[in-house]
Amino acid sequence: MIILRTINDVSRYVSEQKGRGASVGLVPTMGALHAGHISLVEKAVSENDVTVVSVFVNPTQFNNPDDLASYPRKEEDDFKLLASAGASAVFAPSVEEVYPGGPSAQPQHVFDLGMAAEVMEGKYRPGHFQGVAQIVSKLFRIVNPDRAYFGEKDFQQIAVIRNMIKSEGINVDIVACPIKRADDGLALSSRNALLSPEQRKVAPEIHAALKDSVEYSLSHSVRATHDSVVERINAVPHLEVEYFEIVDARTLATIDEWDESPWVVGCITVYCGKVRLIDNIAYRLPKD
Ligand code: PAF
């Protein structure tokens, strides 16, 4: 596995690979890698001749400076994990390399991300998805991948990225990969490393509440299901729901009745102490 630090180096590497007919998969990450990321890398390795993994904590998608400062960084461990997962190259640039002169010196471009970017994370983290679109579109233009891999824990992010490639005219297959969980059900996240032992003990209650609510939803209304999840999680010490929305998975618009959409997902964000955890669950899935 080669480690590339500059845009020129990664562009040259990808052009050489494409020149010899190789297909290229890209796995964008912010590092502090866990088994969820590694499952994306392994899938990319199995589907492409060459897999490039980017490791870059993108400052423009953080609306809270403390969150950016405390985001875990473990570059050496990440590189070892990526090498053993079979990645061909890692692109780990500096902030100056990606945003010469600093993030605020960049040309202003407002991405058309549709309604999917306005709700849930879009509402609670203003500017977050513009920052995600800024870095992901840059990576797509630099690496020019055939396929790009994203985890379904960030369900809304995938919808927003699909809208972004449409509005920007970028041609890439977006591959959505299932959530990886710890044995106790907690969705794997780089932020889990920030939990205290006590917080880590209660955090699985988020998935437990969501999972049990699927059964409950078969005999209860959308509103009752929503409220039962929020009440159960808020009753757990250290946990506080920021939002829980039951949405049409195609548009991310909230639904009032189960039969409004064939594909219904519940998306949740919960503060566990100061750590913001997200998760989601499917209530209804399309038949095919
Ligand atoms: O999901 C993430 O880790 C980030 O939002 C991404 C896609 C790597 C962009 O910085």
Image: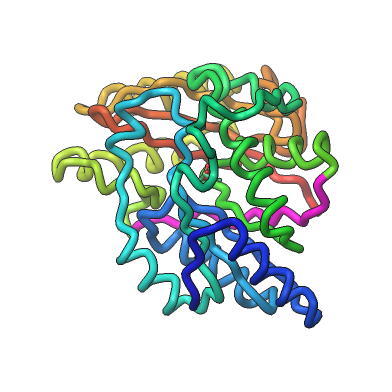
176 in the magenta segment: yes
Residue occupying image coordinates x 37% and y 29%: 270
39 in the magenta segment: no
Residue occupying image coordinates x 68% and y 54%: 142
Q: Between residues 25 and 143, which one lies in front from this camera angle? A: 143
Residue occupying image coordinates x 48% and y 33%: 102
- Residue 187, how many percent across, how many down? 41, 49
Q: Between residues 98 and 209, which one lies in front from this camera angle? A: 98
Answer above or below: position of 90 versus 140. below
Answer above or below: position of 250 versus 125. below
- Residue 237, how many percent across, how many down? 20, 27
Can residue 258 be seen?
A: no
Q: Between residues 281 and 42, which one lies in front from this camera angle? A: 42
Magenta span of residues: 170-182
Residue 243 is left or right of residue 14, and the answer is left
- Residue 227, how many percent across, how many down? 46, 19
- Residue 124, how many percent across, how many down? 49, 18
Q: Which corner quadrant of the image does residue 182 belong to? A: bottom left
**Render colour scheme:** rainbow
Residue 288 is left or right of residue 174, and the answer is right
Q: Between residues 8 and 38, which one lies in front from this camera angle? A: 8
Can residue 266 be seen?
A: yes
